Amino acid sequence: MSKPKLWTKDFLIVSLSNFFLYFTFYLLIATITVYATDKFHASPSIAGLASGIFVIGTLIARLFSGKYIEQVGRKKLLYIGLVFILVTTLLYFVVNNMAFLLIIRFINGAALGIASTATGTIVSSIIPNERRGEGTGYYALSTTLAAAFGPFLGMFINAHIGFNMNFAVCSILLALSLVAAFFLKVPKVEISKEQLEKMKGFKLSNFFEGKALPISFMAILVGLGYSSVLAFLTSFAQQINLVDTASFFFIIYAIAILVSRPFTGRWFDTKGENIVMYPSFLALAIGLFVLSQASHGYFIIISGIFVGLGYGTFISSAQAIAIKVSPRHRMGLATSTYYMFMDAGIGIGPFILGMLVPAVGYRGVYEYMGILSIVCIFLYYFLHGRKTSKEKRNFTEAPAK
């Protein structure tokens, strides 16, 4: 019996649109701290806030996007988000003080929250259930590749051309994302009147999908750890005179995920999520510990491999878990719940860790985040892993009928 088709026109379009969205996000979040420091002489903490406040805006927007996506319509919400993020990105060209930059970053983040909630929900309805782990893994490559090439290009442009070119590149890519969305056909999801009525009002359950909360809590911690790389790798590399090598960190990160993704997605579907989740936490911890000891370029390369295997595997597998455990008509809420928690970790990370830098230095921050990744192994077991193991054991031991 053949597998249902995964690589459809619509799957490719929504993945491409998502790639452009996250390419601009990662390009700017990896360079905006340096921009704020160089242009407005911001402190490390305030520069970190300029990086993280974008994600806070994203988080707040997701809170409402997940609730209203089925009422507004998935494709219509995608259009709204794409137009909104394009317009707000153009406003970077007129920023003339730190306060204005923080405001634009927050609004721009909210726009990303709207658009990316739509793309995540749309792709969940396109991927066949039998290929949920594999499909989500490949879709997540759009974010992974963006996370690799966005910071790389942003750091290159900063060093050789100037900050305004970063804003121009982002504007062009977002315009292309908007154009691509017009060719997207979104599957119609049947929602009963009763289900729709339950999603109205301001109950907590209408803003969060309860079944997705355990894995989403893990996303906060993993996002916090990864934010240390996003926000401070450039500054750390300048401090240890490894800027050229550091610019390749995210390329190595992407290669590690590209090599591993075909295996991890299939293992998720055939062997269960635990087989990929536990190693992902361990790999992330190793990557952060190696980065904390960086004194030569090869440390950064090795770190990129392990961070790619760890964080890259986690984000796709955790999203698949959030969708898997939630009712189909609440896919939008499950998607927004998961990404809200992930955004919270990435958003507050640069600000909190920025306050730690003067006390423990960049090396100390990476060491602490490595320890946090080890702690995640045990937390995951109690929040989700043991339930999965028990269900699998019960299924295996059940007598044949």
Image (cartoon, rainbow, N blue to C red):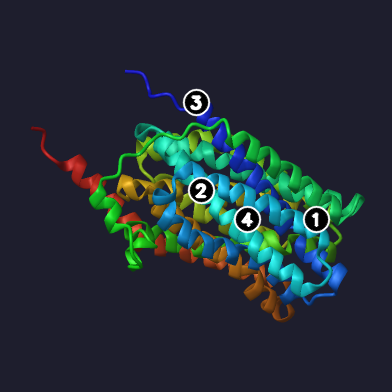
Amino acid bearing label 3: Thr
Amino acid bearing label 2: Leu
Q: For mark 1, what is the residue?
A: 296
Q: Residues within 10 Å of mark 3 (few under 14, many from 20)?
A: few
Q: Secondary structure at mark 2?
A: helix
Q: Residue at x 30, y 48 (%)?
A: 327
Give the quarter of the figure containing the C terminus.
top left
Amino acid bearing label 1: His
Mark 1 → mark 2, Cα distance in angstroms: 47 Å
Kindly give the residue lying farthest to the right in the view shown.
Answer: 160
Height in image: 40 above or below 142? below
Instruction: Give yes or no for contact between labels 4 and 2 (Cβ–Cβ under 8 Å).
Output: no
* Upstream in sequence: badge 1 or badge 4: 4
Name the foreground residue: 66 vs 70.
70
Q: For mark 3, what is the residue?
A: 8
Q: Secondary structure at mark 3?
A: loop
